[in-house]
Amino acid sequence: LRDFPLFEQLNDEHLAEISKLCSICNYSKGEYIFLEGDEGEALYLVISGVVQIYQNNHSRDIILSIFREGDYFGEMALLQNEREHSASARTIEKSTLCILKKRHFIPLVKSKPEILIGILETTLERLRGANKLITDLTIHDARTRIARMLLRLAEQHGVPFSGGILIDLKLTHQHLADMTGTARETVTKLLLEFQNEQLIRIDRKKISIRNIDSLRNLLEPT
Ligand code: CMP
């Protein structure tokens, strides 16, 4: 729990107390954690693996966010009394989650305002992300949307190396399509174009951005 930014203000004693209240749950790849509209029963903290948060509309998934170790989700249904989960959660990779039941979570946030402030800060950051996504999806063409999503993923999940920045997620073309409101075939075509233009490289299902400045310039030419 020490590695979770949410709990960074707490001392060892408090962390030990909370860890006694948590249960650890393993999920296989592609397994549902909860569905949009389900009652909120717990807070979910990602210990390892990758989880997608998405909504489904007319049998199309729209991916709102991707979470990995150190992230948490499911707090909205717990803090907004009488409201259900606002989106569904499913693993993209085999994952291990720490689950803190509502009956333990609510007294915890009531007794520790610093945790509540941390949650508020994360929520505001997520709202900024959601606002950006709305703008991207509304005004840009598919090529720009996909390029901007690659830059965003590099910011959130990027690992710098000598050849550029590796997006450390195994994403399928369908995942990228669901994140950008495009068709899978469009993603395949545009990723090939970006590769031919030496902007990205794809190796073992992971994308790396070879030249982040060129990709940025492509979007906002100076
Ligand atoms: P909840 O509504 O309980 O269940 C779905 C969870 O996904 C939600 O709580 C948040 O933790 C998270 N979530 C919902 N929408 C977004 C978003 N736009 N960006 C990041 N996380 C989100």
Image (cartoon, rainbow, N blue to C red):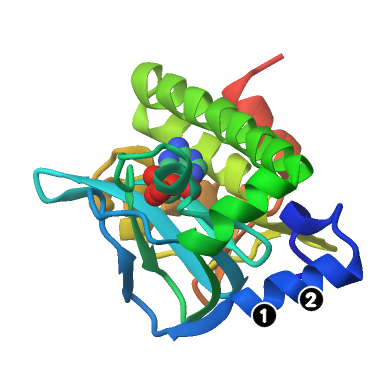
Residue at image x 42%, y 37%? 80
Residue 83 in which image quadrant: top left
Whether residue 128 can be seen here: yes
Q: Secondary structure at mark 1?
A: helix
Q: Measure how far apart labels 1 and 2 are at the Cα level.
A: 6 Å
Residue at image x 69%, y 76%? 19
Question: Callout 1, which amino acid?
Answer: Lys
Q: Looking at this rendering, what residue extends furthest in the right direction? A: 11
Q: Looking at this rendering, what residue extends furthest in the left direction? A: 58
Tag shown at residue 16: 2
Where does the image place residue 134, in percent across and percent down from the top left? Answer: 41, 24
167 up-or-down from 193: above or below? below
Badge 1 density bin: few <14, some 14–19, many ≥20, Cα 10 Å: few
Q: Where is the N terminus found, in terms of image quarters?
A: bottom right
Judging by the rendered image, the residue that carries numbered circle 1 is 20
Whether residue 165 can be seen here: no
Towards the viewer: 123 or 162: 123
Residue at image x 55%, y 83%? 24
- The quarter of the picture showing ligand 1: top left
Where does the image place residue 77, in percent across and percent down from the top left? Answer: 39, 46
Question: Callout 2, which amino acid?
Answer: Ala
Where does the image place residue 118, in percent across and percent down from the top left? Answer: 72, 41
Where does the image place residue 54, in percent across and percent down from the top left? Answer: 33, 50
* Labelled pair 1, 2 in contact (Cβ < 8 Å): yes
Tag shown at residue 194: none
